[in-house]
Amino acid sequence: QQQVKQSPQSLIVQKGGISIINCAYENTAFDYFPWYQQFPGKGPALLIAIRPDVSEKKEGRFTISFNKSAKQFSLHIMDSQPGDSATYFCAASIQGSNYKLTFGKGTLLTVNP
Amino acid sequence: NAGVMQNPRHLVRRRGQEARLRCSPMKGHSHVYWYRQLPEEGLKFMVYLQKENIIDESGMPKERFSAEFPKEGPSILRIQQVVRGDSAAYFCASSQRSAMETQYFGPGTRLLVL
């Protein structure tokens, strides 16, 4: 069964610190790896995404690192801010079925002031 | 441009009743996706629809669940004879021209079955 395993379940970081969330997958057919941010009472919003032809993608304070051989990818949030406090989901999908996202269980990030 | 809208935001049903969840995609979007989020779980794909067509319902339970996206009006996810295990957040997402594009999620409907 297609699975995406996400860790940690929760994370507490001080303001200005680096938040790191990791995901591992099993299905080598996955070729699209987005990260979603979800605030309480809201739907998930696409944050950043990567395809396996690159090992890293950066957008502002958010960076995805991708290790194809290890079947792992991670989200790094630099200079974490209290406004970043949210639940973060990694996801993956297969070429030709990119609409069918398989999500990790989520990481609740708390950034203390 | 209004985002994806879902209603109701909260729905309480007793076991055996029917639940109807509505989703209005973003303006100009013709692809709709439904996901279910159980407590402390990630979202799980249920069904993908285009106007008047079900494209992929591989994630939807075979019994009691159905979905439609009529030519006019919102997409509807219908759950008949609800059970307590149906209690979850149901999210709708939409994309514009194809399933390859970014999905924009609505705020979800929280269903509680008593």
Image (cartoon, coloured by chain):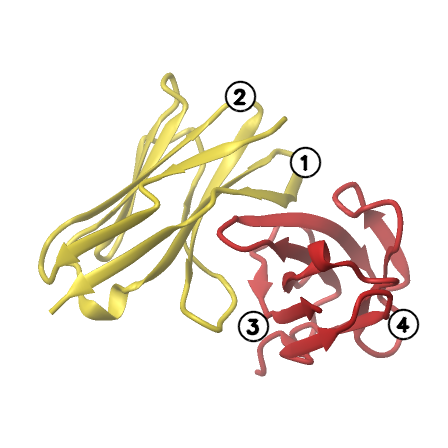
Chain colours: A yellow, B red
Q: What quarter of the picture does the C terminus of chain A occupy?
A: bottom left
Residue A30 location (% of width, % of height): 55, 30
For badge 3, the amino acid type reads Pro
Rounded to the nearest angstrom, the CA distance separating label 2 from label 1 is 14 Å
User: Mark 3 vs mark 4: same chain?
Assistant: yes
Q: Tell me if residue B102 comes above or below residue A30 in the rendering.
A: below
User: Mark 1 vs mark 4: same chain?
Assistant: no
Name the residue tied to disc 2. Answer: A28
Question: Which of the chains bears the disc numbered 3?
Answer: B
Q: Which element type, helix, strand or loop, lies under badge 2?
A: loop
Rounded to the nearest angstrom, the CA distance separating label 1 from label 3 is 27 Å
For badge 1, the amino acid type reads Gly
Front residue (pair B35, B28): B35
Position of residue B50 in the picture relative to residue B1 (left or right): right
Q: Tell me if residue A6 comes above or below residue B109 in the rendering.
A: above
Q: Tell me if residue A109 comes above or below residue A51 in the rendering.
A: below
Rounded to the nearest angstrom, the CA distance separating label 4 from label 2 is 38 Å
**Residue at the spot 62% in from the left edge and 70% down from the top edge:** B110
Q: Which element type, helix, strand or loop, lies under badge 1?
A: loop
In front: mark 2 or mark 1? 2
User: Mark 2 vs mark 1: same chain?
Assistant: yes
User: Image quarter for residue A2?
Assistant: top right
Residue A105 location (% of width, % of height): 47, 45
Name the residue tied to disc 3. Answer: B107
Q: Which element type, helix, strand or loop, lies under badge 3?
A: loop
Q: Which mark is residue B71?
A: 4
Name the residue tied to disc 1. Answer: A96
For badge 4, the amino acid type reads Lys
